[in-house]
Image (cartoon, coloured by chain):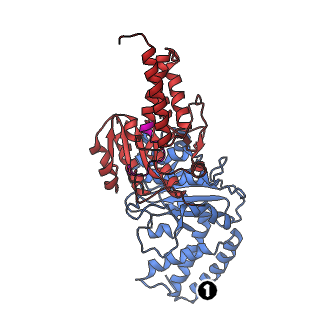
Chain colours: A blue, B red
Amino acid sequence: MKPLKLNWRIVLVRPRNPLNIGASARALANFGLKDLAVVAPFEPTWKEARTSAVGADAVMARARAVPALIDAIGDSTLVIGTTTGARRKLDRELLPLPELAGELRRRRARGNAALLFGSEKTGLGNDEMSHCHLLVRIPTTEESPSMNLGQAVAVCAYELARAGLVDARTPHSPARRADIATAQSLEHLFERVEHVLEMSGYLQPLSREAMLLKLRRHLLELKLSTRGARVLGGVLAQVEWKLEQASPAGN
Amino acid sequence: MKPLKLNWRIVLVRPRNPLNIGASARALANFGLKDLAVVAPFEPTWKEARTSAVGADAVMARARAVPALIDAIGDSTLVIGTTTGARRKLDRELLPLPELAGELRRRRARGNAALLFGSEKTGLGNDEMSHCHLLVRIPTTEESPSMNLGQAVAVCAYELARAGLVDARTPHSPARRADIATAQSLEHLFERVEHVLEMSGYLQPLSREAMLLKLRRHLLELKLSTRGARVLGGVLAQVEWKLEQASPAGN
């Protein structure tokens, strides 16, 4: 099998317990991962986090807290969410973690990949999942599906290393040849889509939010290149302009 | 690949932090393992352990603390130790965890297997390792080899489940057809070996302990059947008797 190395960032979304941040950092260090981002931590006490980050000084020194998910994944070209799948309402396929490596090889994935973990209590929300190209499930039992956050990160980090998916030299590298559209550029595109649909009267108040989440996912599935995103953005800008012309004058 | 299912027991040797006992129990429950034993815990507070054993009530209800390692592995026919391998003085081969499944298939392993984890500070000691048929190493980085205990248990439990090695129905089953000598029967045999060597004047005060540890390992490598252990025990009993006859009268 051809080696497939990605530049991983592990992203903890709204973690509640600082000790889990430290434990996650330790697991990253154990398996050669270097890039940890924390979105809107419930208790942003890095000092407490450090007590459980044994042997992970370098990871902790690089780690940063950001206010929103897009700030953590903006430069990523592949976003993967983790979920227990206990909430059966998911309408998406869950990939068992041991099959992730095979799936990434099939997709010829490359570049900056982000792996997201939700909060201890609730996991990833629907909005967060709508940013994900893939959802993976750690194959836990039905009786006890929910893992401790630090342990879940350790298991995933082990699996990435075991499957030979970790580029040990470089973490997320923004300077990378950006042939695949980043999450940030797709988000800009998506905002434009939203605006166009708004002006077209396509979005209904009751279904609005669910519709937008679904659309964001469909946008991801297009697997746009940087160039493709730019072209589509141009098209949408033109439609936007036309709609603005057509709408009644005045704000 | 033919499925190979073993009846696993996870054994924590002298854990210092009760929260790690609970976290380990949780990881067992997550991956369908049922049997947890704790050898001489530093702080034997099951109540505190329970706070981190979320969703692992059944594992905790079965879990037990025992005073010595042999009490935890007596009915095991295969004993596997985990180590970071950071202490390079080890004169034994360390099997990378991802290769464990293949090795167990080669050995046609079956029955009761125990997987040992040492204390947070020191890992497994030489004496404890001398009880192990195999030593496995979680493939951590050289820079940060040492894992948190609960995370190490989670990674190993995941690997056993992933590789299809977990017999979800039965934990350690003492009633199992005992065609392979158990750790307890080998320990009895070993005590007899020690006594015979003692009387023969083979053991020298300075090298005594190291010699005995090495001999115990060689004994394991014989892979004795229950019957083989009984035959060898009989031979040793005869030698013992003869040596006692030959030694000067009186106690």
* In the image: residue B135, left or right of residue B230: right
Amino acid type at mark 1:
Lys
Which of B220 and A20 lies nearest the eye of the viewer? B220
Residue at (46, 17) in percent of width and height: B199
Q: Which residue is mark 1?
A: A242
Q: Residue B6, image x and y in percent?
A: 48, 53
Is residue B222 located in the magenta-colored stretch of the structure? Answer: no
Given residues A75 and A101, the one toward you in this image is A101
Q: Magenta stretch: dominant SS?
A: loop
Quadrant occupied by the N terminus of chain B: bottom right
- Where does residue A244 sit, x and y in percent of width and height? 57, 84
**In the picture, which quadrant includes the C terminus of chain B?**
top left
Depth check: give the residue in front, A44 or B12: B12
Residue span colored magenta:
B173-185
| x, y percent for residue B192 | 44, 27
Asked whether residue B37 is in view, the answer is yes
Indicate the chain on which mark 1 is placed: A
Callout 1 secondary element: helix
Answer whether residue A48 is visible to the viewer in this image.
Answer: no
A109 left or right, relative to B30: right
**Along the viewing direction, whichever of A176 and A99 lies nearer the viewer:** A99
- Residue B178 within the magenta-colored segment of the rendering: yes
Q: Position of residue B5 (x, y in %)?
A: 50, 56
**A243 up-or-down from B231: above or below:** below
